[in-house]
């Protein structure tokens, strides 16, 4: 971020001087405005009549200037506004006045450019910039236009941050993002668009879900899988690769990754975390940020929004604050917030994360003392949602932890889910959030609330300018003011890289955790495979057994040497893949394996296991209670959004399993009901009999995992 904010010590002082500083910059540091009728010889290229054919791979017509390292010229590209030439260098004429304004001048420091642009913006333009909401492209347009020319968000509301949630191929994404950028460029000041997405390189229950597919982003194990592998180098490598893919498609910001610690096993969002160990989560988050952003934001970076401050994993019986039943964060253990939940956010700040997202919940005053300054003598916390909570954002995040980026609210956290502020008007909610330290509000497309808050004296223009400064700084550092356009064919080439696919596959292999291996039934090596007839079944099976048929097809294609039978009575062994699921949107936390998690026929699993020695793989989006399907398994494998082929390679001994549990598996629901919701399973405050113990006396504690050559690691 620019130096404007680095020297300022606290949010209140920033608010007091932001406007003065911006004005000062314009009067004392501004550059001459070079006009078409001025004394400087000014070349002007109109992209609507002056094309550079062959230079640009965008689907929109653009005028493109290639980078020149000798002159410092960055690549620039324009579709709607002209290109200026000043002293042999070229610039985009974003406001179309045929003059080089300070904010258009890439040779000037970002903080000066931002201050100039802030001074030119109307309140309506600023208010639109401070909102981010879901933007959906037109599906299968016959004319190739994924965005309307009068788009209600970009054109109608001056919005420049959007959330993209669909999963077409990357060339379609590139065309869509280009068309958004055309609209941004055509606006009065030519401010570009920041396209944001939830992580899209993994399987996901509730968010952007992909699988290995041609034209899609590369497919990697989920965050829990990276935690199981324990390989921070692989995480950094993945993030660098993913950043190139996202950048090529025109997506420049991630709503992720999740720094929450999985301390409540019932919580449905554990799938998005790096498990229950704060040290592991911290290392992973640090490397994800460094991989996506680099050491500093630049034209090749993808900005990260780490979530959910100050830690969403501290739940009450898994209840989530998307819903009123889970609207508070409980901390029953003294000091648990600072000890377990904050370290990953400290790592994120150390890595210079661009933005941080607070969770919906408010901190409960029923909590034990967490070691922070008290809100009042009689109240440890102000019981208002974190995105509206001045003590948490301004006091703790900014002043206490030294965060210098911007705060992005969660979707709807300043609307219907503004817990503790339900009685406020929309203008009051927006003002309270922004004054507390929130800079961009998610889930709203109504800038009038901010405009009204300013007009009613609830919110100062200086506070708005501070937020705008942070947001525009990110945009300029990302290079969007010079070249926001991308090449659709290049995006396809980037995701088709076979070396990347191999690296991703290695990550899948490393994520697999072997939990049981009775009588060394695994691996199924070639020598004994000749005697094996394998029965295969997937749970849930899908309509007419489609899931099972699909799994069998994958196995046959990947390893034709395996003999598969569809008759259990002919089988020598069985392989079953169990994929329980719970959705956060159900508002019904549960982790038992049964109809409640999509496994409608548990008895069938047990029957198979009792009939032939059965290899049982379980996809672990949560620490499932396995007391019904574990006892009769001959081998037990834990997976985390893993490619089926990688599981087969582990079963066949093509890869010696090395993964370790990223969380403990509970012994039973009785053990779950006794657990402490704000500490990891291995903490001294936790129930010592929490973890499941199998018949070999192995406890499925955090960090447990077997290998074929080295035996077992019992974990913490």
Image: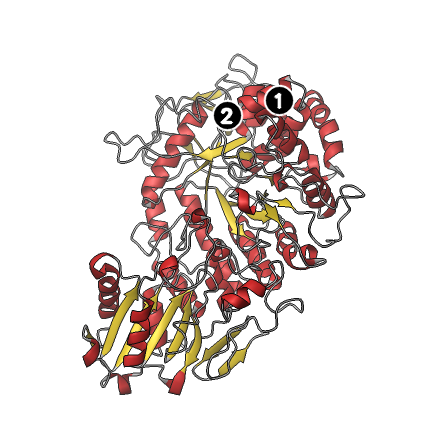
Residue 312: image x %, image y %? 57, 51
Position of 628 relative to 153 (above/below) = below
Residue 460: image x %, image y %? 68, 23
The C terminus - image quarter: bottom right
Residue drawn at (56%, 48%), measured in percent from left and top? 306
Q: Is residue 708 left or right of residue 433?
A: left
Quadrant in the rendering for residue 476 = top right
In the image, which disc is placed on residue 453? 1
- Mark 2 burial class by Cα count in 10 Å: few <14, some 14-19, many 20+: some
Residue 374: image x %, image y %? 77, 45
Q: Which residue is mark 2?
A: 446
Q: Is residue 696 left or right of residue 493?
A: right
- Mark 1 burial class by Cα count in 10 Å: few <14, some 14-19, many 20+: many
Residue drawn at (63%, 61%), measured in percent from left and top? 679
- Find the distance from the CA under tag 1 to the CA under tag 2: 12 Å
Q: Which colour scheme appears in the figure? A: secondary structure
Q: Is residue 448 left or right of residue 4?
A: left
| Residue 226 in sight | yes
Nearer to the camera, 231 or 481:
231
Position of 569 relative to 444 (above/below) = below
Which secondary structure lies at badge 1? Answer: helix
Position of 265 relative to 39 (above/below) = below
Residue 701: image x %, image y %? 54, 73
């Amino acid at each position: 971020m620019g130096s404007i904010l680095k020297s300022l010590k606290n949010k209140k002082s920033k608010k007091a001087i932001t406007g003065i500083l911006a004005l000062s910059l314009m009067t004392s540091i501004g550059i001459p405005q070079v006009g078409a009728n001025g004394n400087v010889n000014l070349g002007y290229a109109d992209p609507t009549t002056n094309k550079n054919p062959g230079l640009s791979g965008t689907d929109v017509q653009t005028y493109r200037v290639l980078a020149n390292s000798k002159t410092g010229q960055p690549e620039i590209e324009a579709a709607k506004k002209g290109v200026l030439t000043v002293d042999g260098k070229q610039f985009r004429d974003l406001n179309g006045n045929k003059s080089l304004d300070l904010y258009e001048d890439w040779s000037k420091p970002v903080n000066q450019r931002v201050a100039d642009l802030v001074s030119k913006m109307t309140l309506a333009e600023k208010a639109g910039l401070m909102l981010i909401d879901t933007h959906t492209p037109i599906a299968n347009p016959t004319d190739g236009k994924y965005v309307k020319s009068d788009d209600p968000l970009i054109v109608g509301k001056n919005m420049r941050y959007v959330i993209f949630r669909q999963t077409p191929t990357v060339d379609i994404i590139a065309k869509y993002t280009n068309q958004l950028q055309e609209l941004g460029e055509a606006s009065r000041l030519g401010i570009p668009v920041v396209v944001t997405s939830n992580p899209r390189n993994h399987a996901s229950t509730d968010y952007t879900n992909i699988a290995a597919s041609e034209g899609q982003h590369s497919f990697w194990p989920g965050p829990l899988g990276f935690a199981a592998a324990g390989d921070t180098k692989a995480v950094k490598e993945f993030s660098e690769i993913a950043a190139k893919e996202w950048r090529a498609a025109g997506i420049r910001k991630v709503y992720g990754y999740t720094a929450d610690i999985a301390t409540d096993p019932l919580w449905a969002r554990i799938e998005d975390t790096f498990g229950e160990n704060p040290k592991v989560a911290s290392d992973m988050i640090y490397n994800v940020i460094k991989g996506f952003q680099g050491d500093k934001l630049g034209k090749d970076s993808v900005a990260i929004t780490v979530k959910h401050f100050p830690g969403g994993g501290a739940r009450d019986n898994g209840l989530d604050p998307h819903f009123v039943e889970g609207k508070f964060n409980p901390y029953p253990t003294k000091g648990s917030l600072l000890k377990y939940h904050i370290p990953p956010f400290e790592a994120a700040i150390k890595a210079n994360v661009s933005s941080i997202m607070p969770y919906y919940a408010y901190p409960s005053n029923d909590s034990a003392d967490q070691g922070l300054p008290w809100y009042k003598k009689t109240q440890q916390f102000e019981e208002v949602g974190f995105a509206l909570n001045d003590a948490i954002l301004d006091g703790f995040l900014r002043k206490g932890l030294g965060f210098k980026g911007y705060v992005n609210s969660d979707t709807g956290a300043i609307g219907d889910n503004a817990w503790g502020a339900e009685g406020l008007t929309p203008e009051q909610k927006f003002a309270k959030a922004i004054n507390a330290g929130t800079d961009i509000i998610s889930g709203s497309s109504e800038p009038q609330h901010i405009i009204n808050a300013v007009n009613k004296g609830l919110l100062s223009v200086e506070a708005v300018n501070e937020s705008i400064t942070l947001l525009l700084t990110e945009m300029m550092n990302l290079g969007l003011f010079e070249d926001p356009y991308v090449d659709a064919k290049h995006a396809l080439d980037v995701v088709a890289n076979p070396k990347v696919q191999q690296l991703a596959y290695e990550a899948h292999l490393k994520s697999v955790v072997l939990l049981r291996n009775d009588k060394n039934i695994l691996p199924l090596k070639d020598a004994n495979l000749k005697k094996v007839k394998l029965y295969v079944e997937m749970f849930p099976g899908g309509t007419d057994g489609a899931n099972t048929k699909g799994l069998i097809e994958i196995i046959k294609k990947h390893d034709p040497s395996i003999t598969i039978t569809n008759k259990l009575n002919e089988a020598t062994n069985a392989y079953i893949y169990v994929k329980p699921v719970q959705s956060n949107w159900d508002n019904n936390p549960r982790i038992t394996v049964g109809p409640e998690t999509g496994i409608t026929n548990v008895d069938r699993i047990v029957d198979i296991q009792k009939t032939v020695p059965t290899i049982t793989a379980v996809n672990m989006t949560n620490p499932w209670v396995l007391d019904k399907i574990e006892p009769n398994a001959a081998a037990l494998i834990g997976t985390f959004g893993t490619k089926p082929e990688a599981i087969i390679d582990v079963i066949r001994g093509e890869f010696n399993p090395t993964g370790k549990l990223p969380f403990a598996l509970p012994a039973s629901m009785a053990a779950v009901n006794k657990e402490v919701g704000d500490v990891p399973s291995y903490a001294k405050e936790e129930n010592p009999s929490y973890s499941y113990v199998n018949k070999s006396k192995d406890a499925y504690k955090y960090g447990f995992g077997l290998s074929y050559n080295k035996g077992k690691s019992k974990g913490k």
